[in-house]
Structure formats: structure tokens, C-alpha cells
Image (cartoon, rainbow, N blue to C red):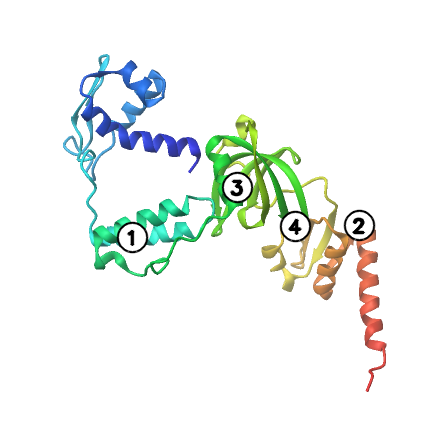
Amino acid sequence: MSQRLSQRLSRLLNMVPYFVANPGITKVEAAAELGVTVAQLQTDLNQLWVCGLPGYGPGDLIDLSFEEETVEVTFSAGIDRPLRLTSTEATALLIALRALVELPGTADPSSVQGAIAKIESAAGVAAGGVVTNAGGDPEPESPVVATVRSAVRQGHALDITYFSASRDAVTRRTVDPIRVVLVDNHSYLQAWCRHADGVRLFRFDRIDAATELDEPARAPEGAYAESASLDLFHDDGTLPRARLLIAPDHAWVMDYYPMTDVVVRADGSVEASMRYASQEWMARLMAGFGTGVQVLGPTELSESIRARAAAALEMYRQPIDR
């Protein structure tokens, strides 16, 4: 969930108790206290008007009077009362919170641990289950993760030192944070990379260092789209590209390595392109596939693979010391 959507959800959840406690308050006054424009407040009220309990009939939905200049709640649908969880609901919530603790960057671990303790205390043994930290102190949050979370929350730019697995290199770059996302059970910082001039995903456990800068993040407006660059692979035109011929029984290779420009031949073999940052790494990878993957180009990569294969054969010719 993006930061802006998260803020709106929090505001919507608090608006009903707020208006119940302040009956007849004007829209202008409420907007000022809630930190939004009158137009945004009107949008939020229209949203609340179609929210409520399952069934979603006239007696289930939140009802408000806001056609004039003032706002009043005529039916709260129970949202102004403290939430009462069944043991099943409490157990499900505890499982979700414990999973959240294991995902860096998604929340403040101490706050999550506090919520877990309160729910376990209120729900009792029926929902207690396995205690996350066996009564000990919560695991401290990594300073790097805390810095990244702070930058996302405050809307500040970040200076990070990052290990790129695809390049097998550590780089330093300035990024403009957008949001924290989860992909394949890993936490990533989605950010505008000023070096790459595009949106990139940075895995939290590969960020070696982070410094929150005293300047606002300035990612282009289009970068904030929910689906922007959530793909873990980007066809970086600055990297060399190998053209490969993959045998039919080695088609599984395409499930493990990012390929583009895929062409299936009549015999079932596949031509595809793959970017790489290190020729030494690419030659080692291709040599490992044997005859299953043939390099069609570039020439220097093919020559590097031949040299590596010749060196390996020469090692077999060496006499064995007894």
C-alpha cells in the first residue's frame, strides 16, 4: 500500500469517531483540524457513505449528514465502539503481525511487538499461540532499515550503498523513495534512482548503508503509479547483451534468468537475449550449461567461453601426483 493510501485509510478510520465527538462541526473547521482540503474532506465523506457492515443495506452502512456546511453522523455502524475480536480473528491477526515482524521496512518492530503483546493479553490463551520472542526484549531494528523507513515516511531523498546481485558489484547512489513493497517474500524499497534515471527496486537485505538527506524526494509524478517498475528485471540498455541459442531440453533456463527478444524455432530450440554486467561471470555461467546453451554473440564472449573450456580441459591432462 502506498504512503498516500495508508494515510487516507488512517484518516477514514478516525473520521467517524471524530464526527461523533464533534456533532455539527463545519466542513471548513473539520478540514483544518484533519489537515486536508475541503474538497478532499468531501471526497472522504462520500467514501464513508458507502462503507459499513456486511450486507451493505440501509441499516448496515455508515450514514452521515453532510449536504449542508456541517457534518453529523446519524449511524456509525459500530465503528465508534472499541473493536471486539473473536479468538479466531485474534489468532489470524497475531499470525499476520508476527509475519510483519519478519519483513524489514514494513513497520516499526517495537510497535508491532507492542500490538502483539496487547492482543495476546486481551485474547488470552485461546489466541496466544507461539510467542514471538519468548518474553525477551524485541529484536532491535536495523539502523539501515530504520533510516529507509524514515525517509519513506518523511518524503526525503536517500543516499544508499547497494549490492547489485545482477552486476555482482556494490554501488553508491542517490534515490527518491516512493514506497516499501513486498515481492516474493522479500521487502524492497521502490524508488526513483537518479543514477539509472528510472524506478528501481532495492532489496532491504542488500542495502549496506543508508543516509537520509535533508532534501525532499523528487521522483517524477508517473513513478508513483502502483504498478511502476515492480518487475525485478529491467532491460538496461547500458549493459552488453548476449544472443543465446537454448536447446529444447534446456528451456528451463528462461525460468531462472531474465530473457528478452525470445524466438522459438521449429525444432523447439529458443533464441533469446540476456543482459550481463561481467563477462567473466557470464562466461562461467554459459560454460556450466555445456551444449545446452550456445552463445551466438558477441564474439568476445564466445572467445572467453572457449578459453575457459580449453583451460578446464588442460587441467584434466595434467598428471595426477601420487
Disc 1 + disc 3, Cβ < 8 Å? no
**Residue type marked 3:** Leu
Image position of 306 (left or right of 173): right
Q: Residue 52 in the image: x percent, y percent?
A: 22, 34
Disc 4 designates what residue?
166
Q: Amino acid at mark 4?
A: Ser
> Regarding mark 1 in the picture, which secondary structure is present there?
helix
Could you tell which of marks 2 and 4 lies nearer the N-terminus? Answer: 4
Q: Is residue 46 left or right of residue 260?
A: left
Q: Which residue is mark 3?
A: 189
Mark nearer the N terminus (3 vs 2): 3
Q: Earlier in the sequence, mark 3 or mark 4?
A: 4
Q: Secondary structure at mark 3?
A: strand
Residue that badge 2 annotates:
298
Taking the spot 80% from the left edge, 69% from the top edge, the residue there is: 312
Disc 1 target residue: 92
The residue that appears at 28% across and 33% down in the rendered structure is: 13
Q: CA distance from mark 1 to mark 3?
A: 27 Å
Give the number of the disc on residue 305.
Answer: none
- State the residue lying farthest toward the bottom: 322
Spot occupied by residue 162 in the image (x, y as percentages of width and height): 62, 45
Q: Amino acid at mark 1?
A: Ala
Circle nearer the viewer, 3 or 2: 3
Real-space CA distance between mark 4 and mark 1, rounded to the nearest whole angstrom:
37 Å
Q: Quadrant of residue 8?
A: top left
Q: Residue at x 57, y 44 (%)?
A: 202
